[in-house]
Amino acid sequence: MLRQLVIFTLAYFLSFSSMWANNIRKKIIIIIIFLITIRYKELYLNFTILQLAYRRNFEVVVNNYLVWSNSCHIPTISVYDKYILEQLDAEESPICSNKKPLVVKRYDAANEQYILYINFNLTNAYGATSDTLKCCYSQIIRVTENKIRYLRCKNFQQDFIVPMNIKYMLVECRKSSYNSLVYQEGLFFIYNREDRSKYSRMNIGDNTFPNLMAILTGFNLTDTQKVCQPHLSWGLSNCSTLFKTLRQQGFTTAFAEDECDINTFNFDKAGFRHEPTDYYQRPLLLAMEDRLMYLKRYGSRFCVGHKRYAEYIYDFGLEFAERYLGKTIFGLFWINSVSHNSWRGPLAIEERMLGYLQELHTKRILEHNVVVFFSDHGSRWGYLRNRKSGFIEERLPMFFMWLPKWFKKYYPEAGAALKQNKHRLTSPYDFHATLKHLSVLAQGKGFSTLQKMPAPQGCVTCQSLLKSIPVDRSCSQAGIEDYWCTCTPFYSVDTKSYQVREISETLIHHINTFLKLKNFTNLCRELTLKTVEAANIKMNIKSVNHTDYKRTTYRITFTVYPSDAKFDASYHLNYETKGTEINVETISRLNSYAKDSQCVKDVIAKKFCICSDSIGTADGNFPVNKTLLYSH
C-alpha cells in the first residue's frame, strides 16, 4: 500500500508543483523515493529468507504436488490432514423414512412399458388396510420454466400400465374412510421411444453458472452474458449449448438438477423457454418441492418425500443410461442438496454414492460409456475455506473421468494422454473441448479430425483432455483469470502494518461503492473494517528471487462490521501504469451469507449486502410442510 500512497502523493505534489521552486520540488520527490527504497529493502530481506525456505521445503516434495512445472506449483491437499480428520466424526445420514415405498414402478422391457405396483402388504405400516386404501396419479405438465400444471388425480388399480405420453406424475394414496393422505411420491418415466442414435455408443456426463457454461458453450462469462443473455426468457434456449448441438447431431439428451430455486440456469436467470433436453426433470422436481414433505439438513432439503433428494437426480441419470444402453446419449445430473451449503454433507451419502458406482458397473454402463464425475468448485466458505489451504480448496473442483476398455483399445493415444494430463493444469474450457472431441468421434470420424476442431471461444489455447496438455502451462494459457489461479504461492506479511490496513480499507470502500452503484444503499448497511486476519503477497516463481517487478498482488482476508462478514480479496499494484487494480466481483465471502442478504437478488451483491432488516428463515432437522413453512 505504501507504493500506492506514494504514487498518489507524487501526483498530488506534482499537480501543484507550479507553486513550488524547482529545487524544492526535486527534494520532495527524492525524499519520497528514498522512503520507498528503505521500506522495501527491509521487505526484500525478509522475502529472500522466505524464498530460501520455500525452495528447501518444496524441492524435495514435488511428488506431493498436483502440478509442478516452471509456470505452475499446485500442492496436494490430503483428505487425511489432521484439521480435516478432526472434523470427520461419524456423520450419521438422516433417515428419510423407515418404511418401504408403498407404490413402486416396474419396467417391462419386453413390452417397453412401465407398471405401477401397490405393496398392499405394507398398508398397515401406513395406517391403512387393503380395503380402505385408494391410490391415484396426477400427471405433471410443464407450462413454463417455473410453472407446472397438475391434471386431475386419476384412481389406478394394481399393475396399472402407465400411458406412454406421461413423463412425470405425483402419486397419492389415501385412507378412504377418512380421505386422509398416507403416501405421496414423485415418479418419472424414460422410454426408449426411437433410435435417435446415428453413430457409435457413448454417454458423456454425470454430474455454477460460469464454470458450467464454460463446459457447455466454451464461452467465458462476458461472452455468455452477451451471446446467451440468460436473463431473457428466450436467451438460453437460443444459445448454442452442448444440449442443443448434441441433440442436432442425433444424441438423446437428459438434464436434472435438484433444489429448483438455486438451479444453475434459474437462480437470478430466466431459465429455458423450451425444455433444453429430451428428458428434463425440473417439472417433476418443482411438483415435489411444492407438494411433498421434506426434511432440511446441511442447509438444504436433504429428504423429499421418502427419499434423499439427491437420489431422485442420480436415479434419473442411472435409469436414463440404462434405458439407452449402447446408444449415443449425453446426460448431465447435478446435485446441490447435499454439498451446496455444507462440506460435510457428502459424508451422509458416501455409502449410497458407492452403491451408484457399483450399479454403473453391474448394469454395464461403465462398459459402454464415458462417465465423468466432477464438481464446479471447492468449498467456498466455512471451515475448509478458512483453513490455510482454503484458497486452493475453493478453486480446485474434483474431476474424475472414466474411459471404457473398448474406447482405450480403439483410441490408445486418448487413454495415454488422459493419464498424462492428471498432473497438468486444466480448466473447464478443456472439458468443453473434450466433450466436442468425443461427439466428433461418436459421429464415426477419426481421431485426426481433432486438428481441425476450433478451440473454445473463451480460451483459444485450450484443447481436448484426450490430447497431451503442454507440461509448462500457465493459468492464462488455460483460460483461468488471475484471481482464480492457484499456480503461484504466497508469502505472509504483517497484518498490523499500515500498508495492509490501508489496502483493507480501500477494498471495503470499493465494496461499499459497488453497492451504491447498484442502488442498494437503502437496503444494505455500510461496511467498516473490523480486523485483518491474513495478508499475503504473491510470489513470481519464474523470477530468480521470486519477485515481480511489474506488479505486486496482495491477498487480504478481513472481517467487517456489521455481522462479522468475512472476505478474501486481491489487490494489485501495477508499477507500469502506476495504478491499482481491484475487481470487486471476484472478492470471496468466506462465511455464510444466506440470512444476511435476503433483501437483494443480485448474485454478486448478495456476497456483500448485510440487509438493514434481517429476514429470519426456517431451518432445522425436522419435517416441514412447505405450505406451513412459508405461510407467514
Image (cartoon, rainbow, N blue to C red):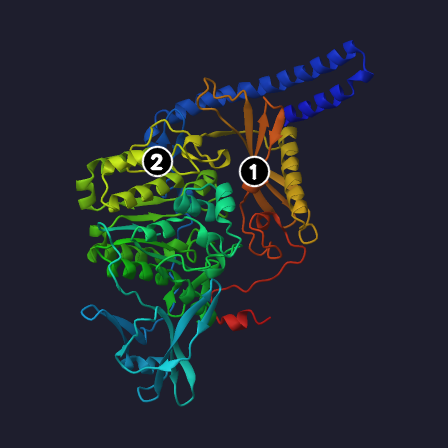
| Residue 569: assigned label | 1
Give the image quarter of residue 182: bottom left
Q: Which of the two discs, 1 and 2, labels the residue nearer the N terminus?
A: 2
Viewed as shown, does residue 515 lie left or right of 396? right
How many numbered tags mark residues here?
2
Residue 171 place in picture, x, y as percent: 37, 76
Mark 1 belongs to which amino acid?
Answer: Ala
Q: Indicate whether 445 appears above or below 602.
A: above
Q: Residues within 10 Å of mark 1 (few under 14, many from 20)?
A: many
Mark 1, secondary structure of its residue:
strand
Residue 61 place in picture, x, y as percent: 34, 28
Viewed as shown, does residue 385 lie left or right of 3? left
Residue 7 shows in the view:
yes
Mark 2 belongs to which amino acid?
Answer: Gln
Q: Residues within 10 Å of mark 2 (few under 14, many from 20)?
A: many
Q: Indicate whether 628 appears above or below 75.
A: below
